Image (cartoon, coloured by chain):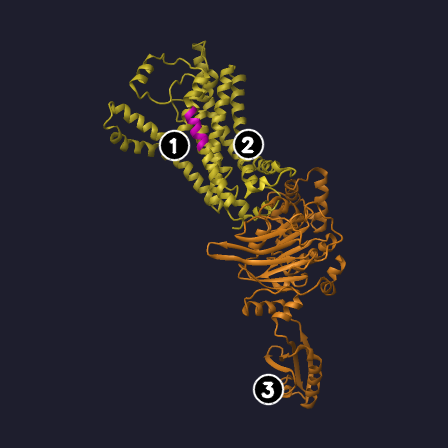
């Protein structure tokens, strides 16, 4: 993971940003970063490199070490071993400079509920050395950006969880950060709120060209916004890459199909083919393995090995259905979800992560998000 | 970590301003909070009652004795003998711990439970800025309340009773205020320690007030009891057992910070107090007998008498604050 990522052309470099990095301009980079609490290893020799301008998802179950990693990146807890570089600086030694340039949305962010949203932000602005009309303008700007301008002058005790989350993002944006770290930004928010928050994040990255690290345990929620994800289990990073890459690596190298067939003439059972009949019809098709029957949808799940044979297999299925007097109701390829990847990855091997293979060009092809940045 | 960071971090703009920003915010929170007004009312009420009796007593005495000196400080020292009402200075001694604990028991743990601590600490300030700022804000708030109450008493004395303080009396009053602030500071530091160590604000408040209650009510009783049991054993071999017993129980009493405060406040306010403790050697007894009783001593002499008390109070405050500070610096940000 030593390849240098392309520089962000749109970002201004502040002085001292790359004074210590030299080799790479990755906004976040760790080498064998370790945190131990007594005998318990919370983070185990973590090697992580996050590229400029990307949204990186750190995924793992609760207690996998995500928050501990984030706290080490912010200099809020000291690593037991290894090194971290955030915007080119060591957060354990120069926490103030790091915190000046990194916006942080903590897990279950809170505000002083006797103050209004605006007053809370004013306090943060002052702590960041902003005052007077400059601060007021900036506060108004970030409030508008997160869509909280109309509620900014009510006390935060009346805010919903989603509003607090938005205010938290505004709070982190106040310092005009180069890097934004969000710990579980979608927890405890209703599904619509999650979509809104993630859309907001995507817009912000597009507008500001920041680098974003977000952690989550709800993989399906964040896979739509992340350029790359890292899968975290028991303090170790067990896989890094785009969702597609991870599917390839942790998947079984097969394409998965959902096949629904019914008899051409309706039988007493209600139109859906008897699973055994369907299985018999599909038996013998090359590269196709039937895996399980989904009784709810009345469909078979099948794997195609190798995945490249998918087209031929589909044709063969249509042919076979005709031969056996069955009607094809649906035939679709199942997208590998991150949850599936995660499950196999965690259940399977706990092994050293291999260097991420994706180049920046590939990323740009996959995500329109990156196109905007390039 | 922080000390090292400071060394490698010269020339960062606004480096020292962190604690001040925290303090300003906390101070604003304090003085607009309900608890500030409740405590101001309690303190005010407690000042008015003894003042009423003191004014009464001073009026009657002043008509007889034309040259009543130190009538002004008498306003703070007077305790009506007919009623169980403490003097102003003694009352401050009892209420100050309440104030100190009330303004600090939730300083850190509330930030933790509200989820504001990680956000606060992720701002470009040092971690100790938070605890320093909170201590400063608490002390400033209570000082404000104390000044207000003392101002009312002094104003009442000057305007209604026509007692104009001499320069020395003003000096004594200010010195007493410093002692009182240190005394409050001790409890503020104690409250801060509780707020760092105990995760639940309600538990911290209960423990804080429990300790205060113990010190205020059972403290004298407990130390008296201990002294009563131990002193005879301790003084058995002494030349003058009675005197040795007294000295011993005095020492035990001074384990209580309340005794330290009450003794120093009494001596610093009242120029006619010439001793803090009973004379314990033959020479001291002789000296004491030679003194003209009731003759006032100079301010610096009073200060000299209570200097050890003051040092002890400041040291206790420093220990409490240092304990809170160290614990807070080492604590994990997460709950």
Q: Residue at x 68, y 65 (%)?
A: A358
Above or below, comparing residue A351 to residue A154 in the picture:
below
Instruction: Please indicate whether residue A59 sits to the left or right of residue B293 in the image.
Output: right
Q: What SS does tag 2 mark?
A: helix
Quarter of the rendering occupied by the N terminus of chain A: bottom right
Chain letter for the residue marked with disc 2 in the picture: B
Q: Which chain is orange?
A: A
Above or below, comparing residue A282 to residue A118 in the picture:
below
Q: Residue at x 64, y 70 (%)?
A: A247
Q: Tell me, yes or no, whether dots 2 and 1 are on the same chain.
A: yes
Corner quadrant of residue B287:
top left
Question: Residue B57: x percent and y percent?
Answer: 43, 17
The extreme front residue here reads A23
Above or below, comparing residue A239 to residue A28 in the picture:
below
Identify the disc placed on residue B256: 1
Q: Which residues are magenta?
A: B307-315
Quarter of the rendering occupied by the C terminus of chain A: bottom right
Question: Residue B203: x percent and y percent?
Answer: 46, 45
Circle 3 crowding by C-alpha within 10 Å: few under 14, some 14–19, many from 20:
few
Q: Colour of chain B?
A: yellow
Label whose residue precedes the other's in the sequence (2 or 1): 2
Q: Which residue is mark 2?
A: B140
Q: CA distance from mark 2 to mark 1?
A: 25 Å
């Amino acid at each position: 993971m030593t390849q240098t990522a392309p520089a962000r052309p749109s970002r201004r470099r502040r002085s001292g940003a790359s004074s210590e990095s030299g080799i790479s301009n990755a906004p976040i980079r760790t080498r064998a970063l370790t945190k131990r609490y007594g005998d318990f290893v919370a983070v185990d020799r973590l090697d992580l490199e996050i590229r400029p301008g990307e949204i990186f998802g750190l995924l793992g179950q609760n207690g996998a070490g995500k928050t501990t990693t984030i706290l080490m990146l912010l200099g809020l807890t000291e690593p037991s071993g290894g090194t971290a570089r955030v915007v080119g600086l060591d957060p354990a030694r120069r926490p103030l400079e790091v915190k000046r340039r990194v916006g942080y949305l903590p897990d279950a962010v809170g505000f002083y509920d006797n103050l209004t949203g605006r007053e809370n932000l004013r306090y943060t602005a002052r702590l960041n050395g902003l005052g007077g009309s400059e601060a007021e303008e900036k506060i108004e700007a970030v409030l508008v950006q997160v869509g909280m301008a109309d509620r900014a002058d009510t006390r935060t005790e009346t805010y919903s969880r989603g509003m607090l989350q938005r205010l938290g993002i505004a709070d982190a944006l106040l310092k005009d950060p180069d890097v934004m770290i969000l710990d579980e930004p979608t927890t405890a928010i209703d599904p619509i709120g999650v979509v809104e928050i993630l859309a907001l994040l995507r817009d912000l990255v597009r507008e500001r060209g920041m680098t974003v690290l977000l952690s989550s345990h709800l993989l399906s929620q964040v896979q739509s916004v992340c350029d790359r994800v890292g899968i975290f289990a028991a303090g170790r990073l067990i896989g890094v890459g785009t969702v597609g890459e991870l599917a390839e690596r942790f998947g079984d190298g097969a394409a998965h199909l959902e096949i629904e067939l019914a008899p051409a003439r309706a039988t007493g059972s209600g139109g859906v083919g008897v699973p055994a009949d369907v299985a018999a019809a599909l038996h013998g098709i090359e590269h196709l393995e039937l895996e399980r029957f989904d009784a709810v949808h009345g469909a078979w799940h099948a794997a195609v090995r190798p995945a490249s044979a998918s087209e031929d297999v589909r044709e063969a299925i249509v042919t076979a259905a005709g031969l056996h007097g069955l009607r094809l109701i649906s035939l679709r390829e199942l997208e590998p979800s991150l949850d599936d990847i995660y499950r196999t990855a965690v259940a399977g091997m706990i092994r050293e992560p291999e260097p991420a293979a994706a180049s920046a060009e590939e990323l740009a092809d996959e995500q329109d998000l990156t196109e905007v940045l390039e | 970590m922080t000390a090292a960071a400071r060394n490698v971090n010269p020339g960062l703009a606004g480096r020292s301003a962190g604690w001040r920003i925290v303090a300003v915010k906390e101070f604003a929170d304090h003085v607009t909070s309900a608890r500030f007004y409740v405590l101001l009312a309690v303190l005010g009420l407690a000042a008015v009652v003894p003042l009423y009796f003191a004014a009464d007593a001073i009026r009657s005495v002043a008509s007889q004795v034309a040259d009543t000196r130190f009538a002004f400080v008498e306003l703070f020292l007077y305790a009506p003998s007919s009623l169980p009402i403490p003097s102003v200075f003694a009352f401050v001694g009892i209420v100050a711990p309440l104030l100190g604990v009330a303004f600090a028991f939730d300083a850190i743990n509330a930030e933790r439970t509200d989820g504001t601590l990680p956000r606060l600490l992720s701002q470009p300030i040092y971690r100790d800025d938070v605890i320093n700022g909170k201590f400063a804000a608490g002390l400033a708030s209570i000082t404000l309340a104390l000044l207000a109450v003392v101002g009312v008493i002094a104003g009442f004395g000057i305007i209604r009773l026509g007692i104009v303080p001499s320069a020395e009396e003003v000096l004594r009053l200010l010195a007493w205020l410093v002692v009182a602030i240190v005394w409050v500071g001790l409890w503020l530091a104690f409250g801060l320690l509780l707020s760092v160590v105990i995760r639940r604000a309600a538990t911290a408040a209960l423990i804080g007030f429990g300790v205060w209650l113990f010190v205020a009510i059972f403290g004298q009783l407990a130390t008296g009891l201990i002294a009563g049991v131990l002193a005879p054993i301790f003084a058995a071999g002494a030349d003058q057992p009675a005197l040795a017993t007294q000295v011993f129980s005095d020492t035990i009493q001074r384990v209580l910070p309340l005794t330290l405060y009450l003794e120093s406040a009494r001596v610093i306010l009242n120029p006619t107090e010439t001793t803090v403790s009973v004379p314990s050697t033959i020479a001291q007894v002789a000296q004491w007998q030679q003194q003209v009783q009731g003759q006032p001593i100079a301010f610096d002499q009073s200060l000299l008498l209570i200097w050890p008390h003051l040092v002890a109070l400041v040291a206790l405050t420093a220990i409490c604050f240092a304990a809170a500070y160290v614990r807070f610096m080492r604590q994990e940000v997460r709950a």
